[in-house]
Structure formats: C-alpha cells, structure tokens
Image (cartoon, rainbow, N blue to C red):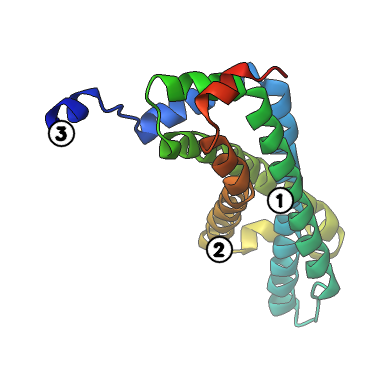
Amino acid sequence: MSSVEEVHRVTFTVRDAIRLGIDYIKRRFQRTIINVSSIALANSFLSSLILTDLFFKTYSQLETTSLSVEAYQYWLVFVALIVSIVGITNAMLIAVYERYNEIGTMKCIGALDQHIMMLFLVESSIQGLSGGVIGYILGVLAALVSTGMTTGFDIILKVPISTILFYFVGTTLLSGILSVIASLYPAWRASKLRPVEALRYEL
C-alpha cells in the first residue's frame, strides 16, 4: 500500500512554486504593481534615512563637523514598515479570495497544504525582493538629493562600496522577510481551504 502511495504522491518543488508565482504575477500585473510599490516606498524611506545618516557621518569625518539624522525619523520609518505589512496582508488575502477555484483545483489533483503555503510565500518573497531592490535605488537617489547641497553629490563616491552593498543586501532581505511575514496568515488560510468549498466559491 505504501508503495502505491509513493507512486501517486504529488511532487511540488520550490522551482514549481516560482514558476506558478511568476505566472500569477503576470496575470495580475496591476495588483502586483500596487503590492511591489507599497514595499518599495517603505524600503526607499528606510534606505534614504540610513544612507542620509551614512553620508552625513562620512562628511563629518572628512570636514570635522557634526551632522546626523534625528532619532524620531527612525520611528517614522517603523510606522511606514507597519503600514506596508498591513497593506501586503490585505492584498494577499484578496489574492486568496480571487484564487479559490484555482486552489480547489490544485487540491483536487493532489496538492497538499504545504504546497499551497509554499506557492503563496514564494510569490510574496518575489514581490518583496523586487520591491526591496526598487526601493533601495529610490532611497539612494533620495539620500543624494537631500544631502547633496550640504555634502556634495559626490559623497557617495567617498563611502566604501562594501558599505553600500551591505545596506543594499540588508534592506532588500528585510523587505523580502517582511513580505513573507505579512503573507503567512493569508497563505495559511489558503492552505486550509477544503477543495469542495473552494470550487463552489464564486467571487
């Protein structure tokens, strides 16, 4: 009996989840743009603040002056990140409702709860990482614009490239992680749908 179950067991890899996730992103591109934009804006706010502080500190070391970012501004970033998480959660819940029939079909052909979870989490991580990259680029530009008149627009050339890359990787990964965290409940809810109810549901 166990050998028969092994033969009929459905295999669903991360590669399959990525392929299906990208396919859904293409089919719902406008909704994806809104989601990615929310992540990008939050990350650009965070990145611009971090880089502004970095540029000020670099300038202060070169010119023996004292420039820094006010501490309260980091609280504003925290609020922006929370708002972004709430927005992502809401968007993913809507995505779950829109895909009830798709989820029901997948379960009918043998998809397990963890497969559905993986699909939504991989999809959200793609959006989170994409938003993180876009947000960091916008953050660099915003930091240069806000500090350029004081420090000179060439201040970025005076900062070690390793530091710039470190913050790029850090903020991008943070965006991906927060996007996945925000999608945990919607993904769990999608995974627990009963096939019959999902197929009967009409949006």
- Mark 2 neighbour density, 10 Å: few (under 14) some (14–19) many (20 or more): few
**Residue 24 is at least partly visible in this image:** no
Tag 1 or tag 3, which sits nearer the N-term?
3
Q: Label 1 sits on what residue type?
A: Ile
- Residue behind mark 2: 163
Residue drawn at the location 67% of the way across and 22% of the way down: 29
Looking at the image, residue 34 sits to the left or right of residue 3; the answer is right
Name the residue that disc number 1 marks: 85
> What kind of residue is marked 2?
Thr
**Callout in the foreground (3, 2):** 3
Residue 189 visible (yes or no) = yes
Marks 1 and 2: CB-CB under 8 Å?
A: no
Looking at the rendered structure, the secondary structure element under dot 1 is: helix
**Mark 1 and mark 2: Cα distance apart in space:** 27 Å
How packed mark 3 is, by other alpha carbons closer than 10 Å (few <14, some 14-19, many 20 or more), is few
Could you tell me which secondary element the residue under label 2 belongs to? helix
**How far apart are the alpha carbons under marks 3 and 2?**
54 Å
Q: Residue at image x 54%, y 22%? A: 196
Q: Residue 88's spot in the image, x, y percent?
A: 70, 43
Compared with 73, 183 (above or below) is above
Residue depicted at 72% across the width and 58% down the height:
46
Residue for badge 3:
2
Q: Is residue 142 above or below residue 163?
A: above
